[in-house]
Amino acid sequence: MTFVWLLCLTSLCMTLHLGTSSAIKIQTYNAGLLSQIDNYDDRKPNIIRALQSADYDVMCLQEVWFGDDVGMLKRELDRSVYIYTPPLYQEKMFWGTINAPPCHNAPLTVACSVFNCADLVNNIPAFVNCSVDCGLMSESQECISCLAFTGLDMMLRCFNYYRRESINAPGVVLLSKRKVTSAKTVFFEPNVKQIIKRAYIEAEIEDVGTVFCSHSTSNANTKYYEPNLRDVYKSWREQNLADSRKLTEAASMFDKPLIIGDLNTSPDVPAYNVTADLEDSYNHFLSEGFVSPYVTMVGKCTFCLQNPLVIDWNYNNVLDHVMVRNHTVLSAKRFYDQNTPGQDIPMSDHYGVEVEIEN
């Protein structure tokens, strides 16, 4: 009898152990690490602390734009965590021998923009057009990106000769606690300078499969203004849909792909007052056999009016997704959706999404 009891207990323990080990937690989180989102300096250490204790197998981060912030991730996270970013853009000086700040070669262009375009800052398309007339798009991608992420009030960061930092132009970062056998960056518009450069990370991860970590084109809620893509796209909707098609085309080569990130497309979820945004892209993912378990199992907004960091926006959206195809889904949830203790704000203007799948 004792032997039978021990056998059953052992079997139960093995079942629990196997059940635990076969569950893979996939997360996406837009950290919002740029100065246009309030409380950047206060939020950053909170994000780092949260990531140090985070429970995930694979996480796709977005909006980690600055080299200093990428460096902080690499210093502060456990060394067992695999961290991959796109190649960082680094300006050079003294014949390429020393790092320089992002806009080292652009003082005249920036001065022209400040002097001639500052009164247009609340009209982004007009401001961009004015800055283009000053020569913005002839400057380096790292300078263009830095100016886009800092804005007029913080642009001195782009000339900081103490930091001389690099730029993660697409802003995406892949974190993995599982072995990564390969990883690469794919730009949606290669060899094209953009105000906001877009790319995805494609990685093969042991016991997970092929992961695509993306931050796709957002709806700027303005007239389309990417200067070098105006002959290609007429709207943010068109560019986002093109991004989505490129993701599913790349994923079509694999049996069990995962497309994760701030995909900047939302379905309509009336039960939770969630409004559709760039929904053609969401429907495209569905037509290619993908599903967003968070939408079907939870459905609450991830970019929400209740979030005090969300400004100049009028709708609740689900923009953040873990898109799965041919996976068994165990659960889904929203995370990082509470205010930081002692503060009246959350860590970002987005909330995180987790989907748990079977190995």
Image: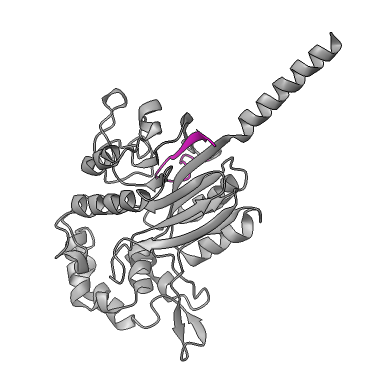
Q: Residue furthest right?
A: 2
Whether the magenta-drawn stretch holds residue 354 is answered as yes
The tally of labels here is 0
The magenta span reads 343-359
Q: Residue at x 53, y 76 (%)?
A: 162
Q: Is 132 or 24 nearer to us in this picture?
A: 24
Q: Residue at x 80, y 12 (%)?
A: 4
Q: What quarter of the picture does the C terminus occupy?
A: top right
Residue 118: horizontal and vertical position, in percent? 24, 68
| Quarter occupied by the N terminus | top right
Say if 247 sits above or below 350 in the image.
below
Q: Position of residue 160 (x, y in %)?
A: 46, 75
Towards the viewer: 296 or 140 = 296
Relative to 11, say whether 77 is above or below. Answer: below
The percent position of residue 95, horizontal first and vertical second, equals 46, 91
Residue 358 painted magenta? yes
- Snapshot quadrant of residue 197: bottom left
- Residue 170 position in % (x across, y down): 38, 61
Q: Residue furthest top?
A: 1
Q: Horizontally, is 198 left or right of 54 in the view?
A: left
- The vertical placement of 241 against 86, above or below, is above
Nearer-the-camera pick, 125 or 18:
18
The colour scheme is one colour
Is residue 38 at least partly visible in the picture? no
Residue 280, picture quadrant: top left
